[in-house]
């Protein structure tokens, strides 16, 4: 794998259901325009509230993808 | 929304079930004494252990709420 | 001044005009309900956008005030 | 707004006049090539000096924009 | 202890004597208006100087207390 | 509990299912070789991707355990 | 510019007027005793309050200057 | 140089030889698709191991480039 | 001292008396099972409270020790 | 106090006795060559060990002093 | 690779020659007592000086290794 | 070594050749005006680019030196 180069994009996913669903929404949407997604790291976990309940989770990720040679 | 002012409180929620349930417990308890809760951010995710298993998750949040004018 | 105790509150001010105006809105609103405000520190500077322009600045402060003895 | 996905770009704006003008230059230039700009956060504020005076401010922002569905 | 909720306050104590005395002043003053204090964490240790000597230590704490059910 | 001493180990758990399952795998494996596990704190949440989907979550924990006297 | 060496000084400027004026006061005062000032970075933005208003802004900078060969 | 705007990309370079070679691979690959590369900053230095030896270094950079006017 | 290798362990000491006593308890307990302790660094200073007073200080250290050749 | 300018120096004090004594040694030594010392902030607390005991504490401070006009 | 668990050790390597040689010394010494070393991350790069020259580099790493099932 | 006091200076070295050469340039230049240099720590590693290649590395160090008694 030596000499590979990767690019890292920052993406925010949201979901009314769970932290994992917000992560998966971010990755699924990114995979429509970028190939070779390889890893992600959670940068922050936030959410918005309405009437004293979680309206949706909002998770910021860094997503790494491999440059095509 | 310009010129609104928000206050931010730090709150710790716990739950034996999941990270999301600990977040929701923190928000539900806070909403009993504070109005206009608007957003939250996860500051740390910890937990306590018993017999090699998670006894409960303990999630620290910052919760933002809008000052009444 | 030895043996004084201070409390620190986190407050978010907004303004469509400037970073300083957002700071001053946060302090003015806080001073209506808390006495003896003594110092502040900027924690983050954010803003919201509309049509490629800054709609308003949003500055998060920690504000210190002296406990009455 | 649930299930929206946002992308975050890091951009550096400069201005000889003020911190706010450097922020606005960064946003105005970014808005020429990216649509749906939604928010920004200031990451660092630097500047360059000449003859003991500020030549220009240089502000690094993260700018969030909404993915078109 | 599962499902308990805690609140976290930021408080600054001062003392001319020692770091521990500054911590204890902050906690003693806070305990006069808040019940169920449970833990603290030191956030920063500063001090003020006069004539090349320490005039007083100034310790910033986060103090956690349990919400009454 | 005064005068107890604790040791803190850094451990990475993985799971194809959820963040909580990755945490529980890390703790279960650690509990096979270390006794008196007391608490954990999440240090980072990452994951690996395959075909635009999450292959597995990878959560780094610090786990505290009490020294036997 | 290769092989140049720079020194970095930490300086705090104050101003009753604006954040930019506090930065410029710090730089102007430093330039009286140090030559070849090249860049600065804002480390923190604080301020002191009086009667619920900003008395003065206090901005901490790191200022870089080129060593004379 | 006043009023220039720069964009910052996060890129990961790898090399079996040295930290500098991993940096140079990241920059060379980036320069094939982006013009006007101006500076970089090392964000993290990692590596992968095989048989108790470094298999390759993996250096994450932020690379700044000037927007064409 | 060139070519020496050190290992770093994270240890938490507690004491009802002072921050220094908590540090010394952590080091004394560690020295019973590890040789060649060389240095420490304080990572965090916390404490637990009872009846509005400090019950015990809890100091987290990283302790470095030299590998035997 | 508006328009004052302060300089900040980083200094490391050591003491075989306590954290406070290490701080005071750093300040006393600094005050022999610099006037108008005004405040300090603890940046890190370390120490060196010998035979499983603390040989000396080593505290790194930032010390602020007022520029003479 | 799902459900694997890794442990992370903090190790300091030194070398009079280069940063890479200090990293490799840390890894080589660790591999004598631990199997399945998988990755490392540089935590800090320091060094000691003698007569105005680098006597040795001292690099702190976190090294990850796979638990044997 | 107890009761020694050290001062810490921030210095930036540059080199077209390698990270180690940039570090050594910073130390060599500092040693011409300051005696008793004792240690350094790398604070950041940056560089400037020209034509898609590294023009020079720019390494920021904190350098510690012992106060003469």
Image: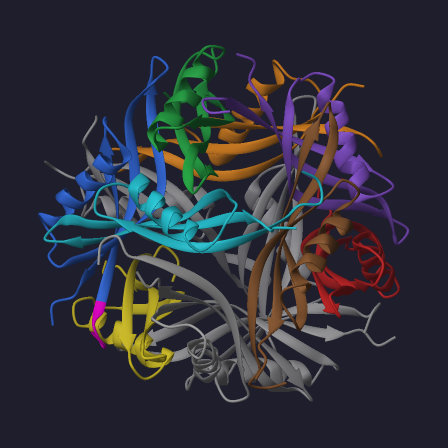
Chain colours: B yellow, E blue, G orange, H red, I cyan, J green, K brown, L purple
Q: Position of residue L13 (x, y in %)?
A: 75, 34
Horizontal side of H39 relative to J20 (left or right) equals right
Tell me what residue is drawn at x 67 percent, y 18 percent. Answer: L34
Residue range of the region highlighted in magenta in the rendering: E1-5
Quadrant housing residue E17: top left
For residue K55, above or below residue I32 = above
Horizontal side of I15 relative to H39 (left or right) equals left
Magenta residues, dominant SS class: loop
Q: Position of residue B22 (x, y in %)?
A: 31, 76
Q: Is residue J3 visible to us here?
A: no
Tell me what residue is drawn at x 82 percent, y 52 percent. Answer: H20
Q: Is residue L14 visible to us here?
A: yes
Q: Quadrant of the N terminus of chain E?
A: bottom left
Tell me what residue is drawn at x 66 percent, y 36 percent. Answer: L61
Horizontal side of I56 relative to L19 (left or right) equals left
For residue E24, above or below residue I13 = above
In terms of depth relative to the viewer, which is nearer, K8 or G11? K8
Tell me what residue is drawn at x 56 percent, y 65 percent. Answer: K8
Q: Position of residue B33 (x, y in %)?
A: 16, 67
- Verify whether residue K24 appears in magenta: no
Q: Quadrant of the C terminus of chain E?
A: bottom left
Q: Position of residue H36 (x, y in %)?
A: 84, 53
For residue K11, above or below residue E50 = below
């Amino acid at each position: 794998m030596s000499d590979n180069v990767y690019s890292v994009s920052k993406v925010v996913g949201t979901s009314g259901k769970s932290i994992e669903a917000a992560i998966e929404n971010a990755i699924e949407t990114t995979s429509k325009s970028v190939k070779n997604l390889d890893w992600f790291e959670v940068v922050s976990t936030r959410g918005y509230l309405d009437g004293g309940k979680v309206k949706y989770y909002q998770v910021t990720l860094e997503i790494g993808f491999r440059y095509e040679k």
